[in-house]
Image (spheres, grey):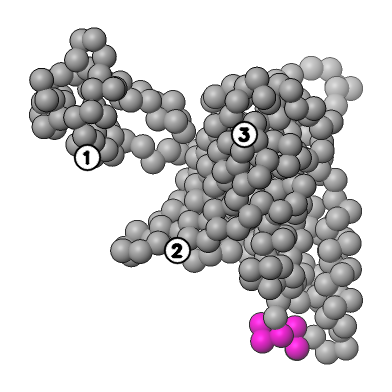
Amino acid sequence: MSDSAAPAAVRGPDDLIQPFLVEQAGVRGRLVRIGSVADRILSRHQYPEPVARLLGEMIGLTGLLAAMLKYDGVFTLQTTGDGPVSLLVVDMGSDGALRAWAQYDADAVARVDAPATGENIDVVRMLGNGQLVFTVDHSHAKERYQGVVALEGRTLAECLQHYFQQSEQIASAVRLSANPREEADGATRWRVGGVLLQRLPEEAGVKDLEGIDAEDAWRRSVILMSSVSNAELCDPVLTPYELLYRLFQEEGVRVYAARQLVDRCRCSRERVETVLSSMTPEQMAEMTLEDGSIEVTCQFCDRQYMFTRADLAALGADEG
């Protein structure tokens, strides 16, 4: 390398959820920045670009929502609809493990005009009429929490804002971005970014901001957040701290401990064995190959599990 060559850009912290507080506005927030984790998840299935972008936004949305909750287990976000993309599923463990999967009609997706790079995916065109389902499975609880809301909005961010406004009655603002990005080595990799703002109720501290008009402070915070571009949300060189400072420096922004994210599926041979053992003989027959074996592929990570006739007999599943 010659002395005149430009130094490589330094990448900031990545694959994380960064909680923060806009101190002079009584506004809390979450910033999500996902690089290699999102790229592995979205590249694994070779989705058409519009599907990958939509699933990427869903991954970012899951991170923002899960970071708001205290749970020991798994948070799952799922959409179902009658459009070209019939199902999106993303779940995040309390340990930061992420996995995601999309079900779609390739021919129908190809007929949808994809938005320009950097723009958000149109939920109406891709998902059609459907619903958004939130599920929290606590490790030591017999029951799980589940919420179901209609998909109302042109983007996933708008759908979430509508949910908070109607169901939780919490003033919220969301930005999401998921796009492929050409990096320094010439390779194109997926990146996901997002930010969520929520206005704190008076009992949580807004009443202590003397001389501050809470309504005006909230509107100003939303305007400042709206100034960020989709490219900035995903920029690996612009660190989360730099981005937050750029947006809210005049209001004062405090950051808290970030949560790291990893690409890790929860499937295992033992889990598959449990599913097979619970199936009826008719269901087993539909899956059985000519040699009497069964092959199961995880929809999330594509890992394959092979069970021979002897394996199935040991499970008590071989009826032959």
Range shown magenta: 202-208
Can residue 102 be found in the magenta stretch? no
Position of residue 67 measured from the top left corner of the image (x, y, whole percent): 57, 59
Question: Which numbered dot is residue 145?
Answer: 2
Mark 1 = which residue?
Answer: 278
| Identity, as a three-letter code, of the amino acid under mark 2 | Tyr
Mark 3 = which residue?
Answer: 85
Spatial separation of the CA atoms under disc 1 and disc 3: 30 Å
- Under tag 3, what secondary structure? strand
Q: Nearer the viewer, residue 59 or 132?
A: 132
Position of residue 62 measured from the top left corner of the image (x, y, whole percent): 59, 51
Position of residue 70 measured from the top left corner of the image (x, y, whole percent): 49, 66
Q: Residue at x 76, y 61 (%)?
A: 173
Foreground: disc 3 or disc 2: 3
| Identity, as a three-letter code, of the amino acid under mark 3 | Val
Quadrant (top left/top right/bottom left/bottom right) for the N terminus: top right
Foreground: disc 1 or disc 2: 1
Residue 37 seen from this side = no
Find residue 112 and report its image quarter. top right
Q: Earlier in the sequence, mark 1 or mark 2?
A: 2
Q: Earlier in the sequence, mark 3 or mark 2?
A: 3
Q: Residue at x 87, y 60 (%)?
A: 224
Quadrant (top left/top right/bottom left/bottom right) for the C terminus: top left
Spatial separation of the CA atoms under disc 3 and disc 2: 25 Å
Q: Residue furthest top?
A: 290
Relative to 37, 228 lies left or right: right
